[in-house]
Amino acid sequence: MSEEPKVERNIADELSKLGKQVGDAIKAAWESEDRKKLQTEITEGVQKFGKEVSEAVDKASESLTAKELREKAEKVVEEVRESDVVEEARKGILTGLDALNKELSKLLDKLESKPAAPEAPEPPAEPPAEA
């Protein structure tokens, strides 16, 4: 049997790989069809909500109070749109960090369960010279 050469690995390389994998995982989650579908659904809902609010404000009156109400309603709609995107990003980051913590926990368990390397035995003392 031939021995496979041992590849020397270092912490920096492993952290680099881990960082890339975490980035890839976040990217994959962000680009997933479920996330896109949810974003579309939320966007359409917010647009319908905004349309309904705008129509209700238009029907009210064109008084100063009605104009102020419309501006506030539009501002609320915009804030809702922005907060949904932030929430999705937050959820993705939390998922990635959770997975990272679980993997690091597994690594720590493995490292802590390995027995310490035995110390090299001391050479026996030389017998005293005979006189």
Image: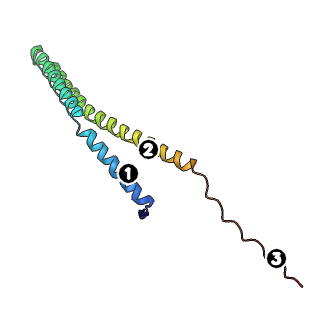
Question: Label 1's element?
Answer: helix
Left or right: 83 with respect to 71? right
Residue at 44% across, 44% down: 103
Q: Nearer the viewer, residue 126 or 67?
A: 126
The spot of residue 38 in percent (x, y) is 22, 29
Give the residue at mark 2.
Answer: 103
User: What is the quadrant of residue 17 in the picture?
Assistant: bottom left
User: How many residues crowd around disc 1 within 10 Å: few (fewer than 14), some, or many (20 or more)?
Assistant: some
- Which secondary structure lies at badge 2? helix
> Do the residues under discs 2 and 1 have CB atoms within 8 angstroms?
yes
Above-or-below relation of 52 to 13: above
Residue bearing the label numbered 3: 127
The residue type indicated by label 1 comes to Leu
Q: Which mark is residue 18?
A: 1
Quote the CA–CA distance across marks 2 and 3: 54 Å
Given the current orientation, which residue lies at the most extreme right position? 131
